[in-house]
Image (tube, grey):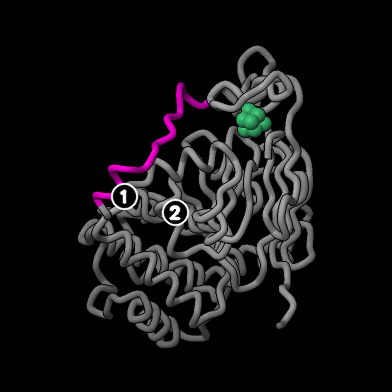
Amino acid sequence: MTEKQPLLEVSHLKKYFPAAKGAEVKAVDDVSFTIYRGETLGMVGESGCGKTTCGRTAMGLYPRTGGQVLFDGRDVHALRGAAKQEFTRRAQIIFQDPYASLNPRMTVADIIAEGIDIHGLAKSREERTERVYDLLNMVGLNKEHANRFAHEFSGGQRQRIGIARALAVNPDFIMCDEPISALDVSIQAQIVNLLVTLQKERGLTYLFIAHDLAMVKHISDRIAVMYLGTMVELTAAEQLYEHPLHPYTQALLSAIPIPDPQVERDRRRIQLEGDIPSPVAPPPGCRFAGRCGRACERCRQEAPALREMEPGHFVACHLV
Ligand code: SF4
């Protein structure tokens, strides 16, 4: 078996934002994980759990408050000049909202070719046009679409344009920031299938962010579950679905509908009480304690560390 090669290594990453009266929003608070070449790491959690901020800070879009992010061994936040330019080519983003992320005044060809122009990847006008046609073809569109504007397309087609734009610069890594959340359920599977196919063809590595576990199931090799700025569980996808250890993961999984009506009737749902607390003043101890049916005194006083309970299966819970 070939050894796994790390591509993105995130260590003790912190991202705090200033809040009113000198307080801080601890959006990401000491998060560590590695993404290996060619894999998809799914990152899941409710709104406000810090998953998008974590991804964006790891991509160097926000300065970090603490910790370190290495991309191919180099500190993302220390990159300057040509090295930074090369990183912005190699690491791309597909955004959540295909309606807002495409410039309405640009043709599809110009949207897709923007990165080709910035990074000087086409030697002539003809080569640029050929690349745009190839990219349209690759994402299931065609060259007749090149001179149209984004508003002429459906949500699923716009997300295909967003994917073509990301692929245009031959990246190694793509952060997919809730790329299917704004789409109809019938379209979601098509976009996930397209991303899986492109990954196989082009050896891509993905960070795939979503707000529920159903969305990451078919694309992830491993899954990280975030809660209130911290990572509470990280393991192989099949292990997470079959043998979740953290009470929060168990609650998220119990909320996914099962197509078999008999199984659906007999299963036990774990109700999550209350909302995710404010990241301005997170509770001391375990951040999930206020909503956890198994919380004990220790949970309210001492924050559980993320520990490896089984090979490759990391959990932050005192009772596991
Ligand atoms: Fe629940 Fe305690 Fe585990 Fe936190 S540490 S998830 S409160 S049992």
Residue at the location (37% across, 80% down)?
A: 138
Q: Which corner quadrant of the image does residue 62 belong to?
A: top right
Amino acid type at image mark 2: Phe
Provide the residue span drawn in magenta.
261-276
Establish if 309 lies above or below 16.
below
Asked which secondary structure carries label 1, the reply is helix
- The residue where tag 2 is placed is 95
Q: Position of residue 117 (x, y in %)?
A: 51, 72
- The residue where tag 1 is placed is 263
Q: Position of residue 300 (x, y in %)?
A: 69, 20
Q: Residues within 10 Å of mark 1 (few under 14, many from 20)?
A: few
Residue at the location (44% across, 87% down)?
A: 127
Going by the image, does 181 lie left or right of 229? Answer: left
Q: Quadrant of the N terminus?
A: bottom right
Ligand 1, seen in the image, is in the quarter at: top right
Going by the image, does 270 lie left or right of 234? Answer: left
- Disc number at residue 41? none
Question: Mark 2 or 1 closer to N-term?
Answer: 2
The main secondary structure of the magenta stretch is loop
Residue at the location (67% across, 28% down)?
A: 286
Single out the mark in the foreground, 2 or 1: 1
Residue 17 visible, this angle: no
Residue at the location (22% across, 61% down)?
A: 153
